[in-house]
Amino acid sequence: MTLNTEDILKNLNENQTEAVTTEAQHALVLAGAGSGKTRVLVHRIAWLIAAEYVSPYSILAVTFTNKAAAEMRNRIAFMLQREIRDMWIGTFHGIALKLLQINTEAAGLPKNFQILDSDDQYRLIRRCLADLELDEKQWPPRTIQAFINDQKNDGLRAHEVEDFGDHNNQTLIKVFGHYDDHCQRAGLVDFAEMLLRAHELLLNDQAVLQKYRQRFSHILVDEFQDTNAIQSAFIQLLAGAQNKVLVVGDDDQSIYAWRGARVDHILDFQNLYANTALYKLEQNYRSTQTILDAANGVIANNKKRLGKNLWSAQEKGDPVGVYGAHSEFDEAFFVGEKIESLLAETTSADDIAILYRSNAQSRLLEEALLKRSIPYQIYGGLRFFERLEIKDVLAYSRLVNNRHDDIGFERVINTPTRGIGLKTVNLIRNYAQMQQSSLWQAAQTLIQEKKLTQRAATSLAAFINLIDELESNNQDQPLEQLFSDVIERTALKDHYLKEPPEKAQTRLENLDELINAAETFVISEEDAALGLTPLAAFLAQVSLDAGDTSQVNEPHVQLMTLHSAKGLEFPVVFIVGMEQGLFPHQNSMEDFNKLQEERRLAYVGITRAEKQLFMSYATSRRMRGKINACQPSQFLREIPKELIQQIRGNIHPTQYVSSPQTRTPYQSQRQTVPDSPYQIGQTVRHNSFGEGVITDMSGKGDYLQVLVQFNDVGPKVLAVKFAKLEIL
């Protein structure tokens, strides 16, 4: 069956058609969010084959994920009604690996070279550190792994990395060189090496370069704004002076600088490639015009961009709902309550997403959904209390609470490493099984009976003493003090700091949020009557929440970071934590380029919404153990005022002023609880915590909770049913 060229163009708009049928040598397709960029790529390839009679053998199409590559291949095959086996469609790494496998000798590799995944690479780096007699505590393998991969992504070998003359930099270069030498001798190729080695192959072997330049007359690249230095150089080298390059991307959605992506590659494309035609895809098929106008209003404040203006043929749509919360608790209550009302109407949970800047923000949102029995899922990640760093702290705490907790014992006995190896752990495990005792008891007995090596016994005794001291020091201390002491005394924070910076920062933010959770936790009278300590009650509640698997097969509300949301879309989107210092992130406030990227991230978040968009901020938020006054995000103020429906608060004044006496109708409805004598602004007294002021309320009836700012102990969330507050 021969495909009619008119069929290829039939469902394309004017701008898409121009991009698909371009005769320019090079083309930059600036594709806005939801504008059909994948369709342009697929139809362009079909056009080349069916209308211009280009052989599939001569086409190279590069994407960023295997899923996208498979989708592209299937759609092209469906359009052409035939297989296209000769065409190279794949990720940068997939294409590079194919080149190396075909040209092993020219690439300086053995035919049976081995691919190293991330874990393999990590283990090899540890071996290199041992070879060089470098202490892993001073030279964390994860940090060195990130350094090596960053250099390779920038196209650099060890001898090409700039030596700044300081010992730290020189040591990193030394380990990099030793690692590279080992890989070369053993025929090992890590993921960053694939593309670097493929680039070097083309750069250093003219015969191979000419072979592939002659073959690939048309090169197409998706998501070009996300390319790093070596990826861009690879495409430029392969294209040469004759081949045609068409790239699709959106400079306004470049949000991965921390991975090495460089937005300048798409901004400077027309300068790098002569005779480039620019096509802008501005018609959005996803969102209402109101949502697009909000996104346009925000991104227009970026200085470094090619410029485009999204529009939609759909209806204008609902205004953007903006909620100014008193606190993060109030914000979570608003989101939970609003989702509950949406589900009660016609909205499916699968149609709703909650987006946030930091992973740590998920905890209160999870609580709000759990209280309402609303199914949810953390997209691409773990629930708060399932995260590694949280489970580590809780495992130590479980041992403080109950020495016979074998699972907690095994998890942290050598985390962080303290010289207790697998051989010692197996000995403890076997002895406990033989004696029908707990691991804790077995460890104590083995020490007393001197059945361990001196080193193992010393390390194990230190661990046992640590747990005993944690309990002794915190018998009369608040729960948050125990968690703080666990983090401090066990050196967990230093342990996580050995990981790549982005991951380490996320872990530390989650630890701060765990302390926040402990600080606002109040044991119920029922639990206290049962004789439970606050720690035991807290751990029991965590276990109950984690064990709730009844929602697995139901429609889910999706919770995710803004970075994870790229490429996804939902009818209803909530973006929370829209505050200066949180979003835009504090780390970007003084850096022009980072602030530009934060704004692009806001643009990505806004354009995930199809029909309804809600954004929220808190005027106070607990961060790192302190309650901070917060200002609404500048990104909120960049949305045109006429597009916003203020549910509560006012984002447009330079300084936000909160007053309990001046509330919108919605706020009054939210805060007036039937049959309750409590209201925001009241002074109350608690038997244990003393006097304080109610700053927020949520729930109703037996589930009514108040947030009280106590004079002596700070904020506490209390269940009114059990708290027995006295109104002063």
Image: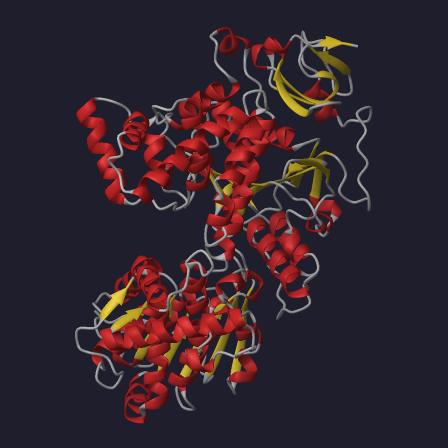
Left or right side of 353 for 679 = right
Residue 147 as seen in the image, left or right of residue 726: left
User: What residue is rendered at 59% in x and 32% in y?
Assistant: 516
Q: Is residue 224 left or right of residue 584?
A: left
Can I make out residue 7 in this image?
no
Quadrant assignment, res 488: top right
Is residue 293 placed above or below 222 in the rendered structure? above
Location of residue 222 (image quadrant): bottom left
Image spot of residue 565 (x, y percent): 49, 49
Residue 718 in percent (x, y) is at 62, 17
Task: Please state which of residues 512 and 154 is positioned toward the viewer in this rendering.
Answer: 512
Q: How is the image coloured?
A: secondary structure
Vertical placement of residue 335 versus 418, above or below? above
- Which residue is painted at 42% across and 36% down in the image? 391
Work out whether residue 76 can be spotted. yes
Q: Position of residue 509 (x, y in %)?
A: 55, 44
Picture quarter with the N terminus: bottom left
Give the vertical position of 488 relative to 679 (above or below).
Answer: below
Q: What is the count of numbered marks? A: 0
In front: 282, or 420? 420
Locate the C terminus and report the quarter of the image it occupies.
top right
In the image, residue 421 above or below residue 284: above
Q: Residue furthest bottom?
A: 206
Image-based side of 216 in relation to 505, left or right = left
Towards the viewer: 642 or 267: 267
**Residue 286: % across, % down:** 51, 51
* Residue in view at x 50 percent, y 67 percent: 261
